Amino acid sequence: MANSTLDLARSVNAKLEREKARLNKIKSIWPITSEIPGVNLLLKLFDVVYYTSLKAEVGRPVVTRLCLVNPDKPEDSPPPMPRLSRWQIVPLAVRLPLTVAALVKIAKAADPWTSALAVFFDKRDQPYIWGLIDQTVHWNRMLVREGSGYDPPGLFNIASTGVADLSVYRGTSLLARLRQDTLLETENDVFWHGPVSDRLAQWTKLFRRRIRKQITPSIYDSQHDVVFMCNDLWIASLCRILIHIQRYRHGGALLITNRNQDLFPHYTVSYDRLPKHLLQMAIGNIRTSIAFDAIQEMTEFRGRRTVPTKAYIEEILAKGEVEDLEESLTGTVHFISSLSCVDGLVLMRPDLTVTGYGVEIRTSMEVNTVRLSLAPDISPETSRLIESNHYGTRHRSMMRYCYSQPSSLGFVVSQDGDIRALMRVGGEVVMWDNLKIRSVWFENWTSARSRKEKAGSIRGDVK
């Protein structure tokens, strides 16, 4: 059954009410004090954004981000000492009724990557635009692991990033997404749960083994949560590549395999800067943690009022090295993503070395059906068989290859921005869409902790 903006409004209203009750129950220091808008109010807001997304400017869909912010009380608990990069709301001298025509016009000055519009409801329950919000670029960069930032202001924010494609967030958490006529209330967290996560765990274990060998087992084994830190670093880099391929809006594909059979690259390379940087970054993070712990031991546990110069310099140097690596890692991720602009897929080894791009798959094996899974773990309740001819050439070639090479893992990015993961599970190809690729480390830490079996214990997991 097709979904509509009414279903989106009902879902968002219900989730906000539950979240408000939960925060009150645990007596959170960041409660929701504002009144949750009713379904009819939310419907008015979502309808305007939805119909605006159907418009086009210079042949491109209108994209924008709106934050529901009360102008009389923009935030419940402002920080006592906000950083200079924190957002600021710039009020409009004259408030504008939130209509499709007005939003199409003002959206040109509110690129959802860098800014947002502040909206609210008047006494007649009509939505209006009352300001612009700057510095949201830092929040977006935080979600793609390229910096830190603050959540946008307001009860929630709604982003329109494509035709009839609306996503509603509270902070970094997705409340619901309406994609054309399909309501999605959760994202597929395949990177931390299910068969895709299990496949990645095989490769991240090899990554951790290299780290442990280089930094010495005794140092590695002494670190708290070192398994998660290494896995998160590796997985986040893969997600960042997919995000930047998505932002090109031309479609693309990424294949991770240690096989060459049926693969014909137009451009053969050996680009290993990413695995080298990941190794250096993980070691740098461990050294920074050791230096910080040493200073904390001196000042907090031993009561010293001064810190030896050597300890201070070691921490500063370790932090500086990590910051340099972060900058270089960002450039490396962008470079790899740009290779997807050539027709054909980007080919990577399980250690994330790029071995080719513009790669053509020429396997003759046909796959007539694939299993579409709506959850990370596969079950009859959350998956169904679909015919492969519902998808384009890029998807079908990846289906054929993943079936013929069971140890491979493929990702396909559609021109409309959808990202799908494909791999063979048992005797069939399974495909996951609506992937959770934007996240912050704490969300990933929670996901990793919720697994019934973590990828090894904190100590000695890769001996």
Image: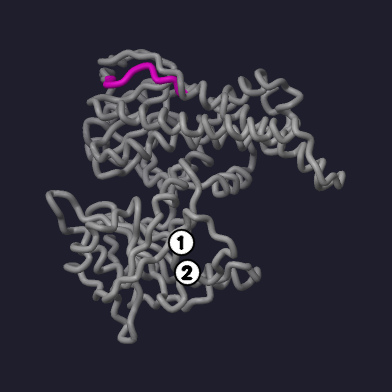
Q: Is residue 305 left or right of residue 242?
A: right
Q: Quadrant of the C terminus?
A: top right
Residue 226 to residue 374: above or below: above
Q: Earlier in the sequence, mark 1 or mark 2?
A: 2
- Cα gap from disc 1 to disc 2, whole angstroms: 9 Å
Do the residues bearing badges 1 and 2 touch, measured as CB atoms within 8 Å?
yes
- Does dot 1 land on a helix, a strand or a loop? strand
Residue 249 to residue 164: above or below: above
Q: Is residue 105 left or right of residue 213?
A: left
State the residue position of label 1: 170
Colour scheme in the image? one colour
Residue 97: % across, % down: 24, 75
Residue at 33% from the left image edge and 82% from the top image edge: 122
Question: What mark, if any, has residue 212 been given in the picture?
Answer: none
Q: Quadrant of the N terminus?
A: bottom left
Q: Is residue 217 magenta?
A: no
- Does dot 2 land on a helix, a strand or a loop? helix
Residue at 34% from the left image edge and 31% from the top image edge: 337
- Quarter of the view holding residue 311: top right
Looking at this view, is 150 or 210 the one in front?
Answer: 150
| Amino acid beneath label 2 | Leu
- At label 1, counting other C-alpha atoms closer than 10 Å, the crowd grade (few under 14, some 14-19, many 20 or more) is many
Residue 314: % across, % down: 69, 30
Q: Is residue 76 left or right of residue 56?
A: right
State the residue position of label 2: 16
- Quarter of the view holding residue 272: top left
Looking at this view, is 94 or 398 the one in front?
Answer: 94
Q: Residue furthest bottom?
A: 123
- At label 2, counting other C-alpha atoms closer than 10 Å, the crowd grade (few under 14, some 14-19, many 20 or more) is some
Looking at this view, is 165 or 429 the one in front?
Answer: 165
Residue span colored magenta: 352-359
Residue at 43% from the left image edge and 78% from the top image edge: 72
